[in-house]
Amino acid sequence: MKFDSITIKSLDHIFHAIDEVVFLIDQQGTFKHVVRTSQDFLLLPPSEFIGKHHREVLPEPISDQIEESFKRLSASETLVSFEYSLNVGNGTDWFIARIGKIIDDNGSLVGYVAMIRKITHKKSMESGLVRKEKMLEAIAFANKELLENTNLTESISNGIRELGIATGADRCYLFENGFDDEMGEETTSQKYEWNSGSAAPQINNPDLQNLPFSAVSDFVEPMTKRVPLNAIVRELPDGGLKEALAAQDIVSVLLMPIYVQDYFWGFVGFDDCYAERVWSESEINLLKSYAVSISSAISRKSMEDDLKRSKEIAESANNAKSAFLANISHEIRTPLNGVVGFTSLLSDTELSEEQRLFVNNLKASSAVLHSLIADILDFSKIDAGIIEIIRSQTELRTFVSEIENILRYQFSKDGNQLILNIDPSIPEYILVDSIKLKQVLVNLLSNGSKFTSKGVVTLSIVPQNEVLRFEVKDTGIGIKPEDLKTIFNPFVQGDLSRTKKYQGSGLGLSISKKILEAMNSEIHVESEPGKGSTFYFDLRDYEVVEQEKVQAENLSGDRTYSDLKKFKLKILIVDDNEMNILLASMVTRKNYPESEIFLAANGFEALEKVRQSDFSIIFLDLHMPGIDGFQTYQKMKALRPDLCPVVALTADASETAKQKCLDTGMHGILIKPFSPKELNDMVVKCTG
């Protein structure tokens, strides 16, 4: 078979029916005929092909693929296809070539038929889909970074890098807007940049820092209206924008504005430096979504920073408040310690009836003052969130007796009777914060007596299921129904006209309510004007202590105060306040006449005395100039590892201060003002 005119004419009729260009090629690779179709895309006229070898008219890469196809067809394959591209004008066209064998009647190879189809549109669609998929993956990554990475700078940098790679841009960057006070106008500055390596980096370009809006109004103006700038540089009108972009070798650009709420915060940009990119609408929308994500991240970071600043301010204020409370507590309780202590000492001396009356009144006044100051300081600490519950082993009946002793004088003065209604089935020992529970009950009973005249106040403790019901009932003036809603508010005493008649801070019930809430309890009140009031709560935050454990704990330390009076103790008192040191020395000399009392006005004197002598017990003030009590104690321990028991003296009544003393290794703590009995009890505890 040969390519004669009859054969070619027949083939023309056949191939004109298909949408492809067809070449007939002989065994040597020479073009014998070209069939042109309605979709003609030949770059050369047919005459340029006929009679010429394919290497004479085709680029080398395409000719190489044709030769490879001939080899495969000669071997065993019947049809071979491959894709190739050609630069056409300002763009690139893609084609697919399918080559088959031409066999004669004898089965001999006489040539090849090559069918060429243009697939630029298909390739463009495929390329767009791939790029869109890459963009989606990049935006998903960038959004995840913005959500999970707490470092905003790092998350934006990582996101821009991934988007730059996915979009095939030569540069990807972010500008942040600001206001220049000197220029008196808004500016924009480049903050981040990713570079593919094919274009010159601009991140260190000083011309891109503090750019006034007036100098770049051409590309800023559209974005101030929330419109992206999507431009091919050569199509821009002559002027500043075109010149500025061309100076950075930018051929096409896409700028996406970033708005934080209604503020034009900045923009993210994509540069192409070699091709005129036409961004599709879907691509622009994807990048818009990323700009919105950056906006959300900036807003979130701003809120987090505001919250952090607010927290820091609150913590600073709280620390200042705590420091103030500790200081004012020390300043108030220290002189009060002298008033209470010396009044107690004075009451034990020989007095005339008139003097005894004066001392009793002084005792009563100092007790009221102590109560008021304690309420104010306690409320301030509780209001600042400084409330700690520390449970310890408590014998309930002894606990109630202590409360009775505390209130005996007030009830006698008010002419009231205190009745104790303690159910015999209550546990003997429980684990509870006895200090705070005592504070609540003393407040309630004191109030009951204060608002009752020549009547009865009853304290009842009754087990109910798994709780202990505490109830304080009085026969006093009662509370008006409208006042019941505010009775637990701070500084409230029901009828304001009572303030002068009934002394008090108006904080007792508020403090009691807060303490009970911290102990997982709730206080309730029932009252009727003229018939008295009943306050009650159910104690849940306690544990019953088994008798065996109680006995084991009570085996140690059975020496009493009377036993110690005849022993010769060596007691060191360290305090920088002359009144306090005088009071402590007088109490100890009076109660331990056989003992030696040593005094030190500061930590340095105390260290010198510890260096020279052993002691039975040391009372150490915590607030001293030079070196404080904690530092003094540590230095004492360094001097004498077998140091005697050390008891802290402080006006700081916080649980934190108490715990710090115990954690440091001190044996106990006395809170100013303390009574002679409390001091003696501590001596028994530490030296018995």
Image: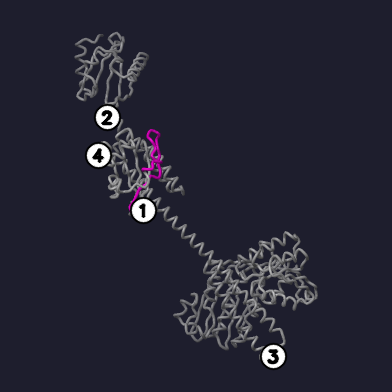
Residue bounds of the magenta highlight = 178-207
Nearest-to-viewer mark from 4 and 2: 4
Question: Dot 2, crowdedness within 10 Å: few (<14), some or many (≥20)?
Answer: few
Q: How is the image coloured?
A: one colour
Among the 4 quarters of the image, the one containing residue 413 = bottom right
| On screen, residue 637 above or below 473 | above
Question: x and y percent of residue 322 in the render?
Answer: 55, 66
Q: Nearer the viewer, mark 3 or mark 1?
A: 1
In screen coordinates, is 567 left or right of 66? right
Residue 385 versus residue 168 in the image, above or below: below
Task: Please name which of the two marks, 4 or 3, marks the residue nearer to the observer.
Answer: 4
Q: CA distance from mark 3 to mark 1?
A: 84 Å
Q: State the residue position of label 2.
A: 90
Tag shown at residue 238 = 4
Given this view, does label 1 or label 4 mark the residue nearer the observer? 1
Q: Is residue 314 in view?
A: yes
- Kindly indicate whether the residue at mark 4 contacts the one at mark 1 (C-beta within 8 angstroms): no
Rendered view: 132 above or below 102: below
Number of the label disc, if any, that sits on residue 380: none
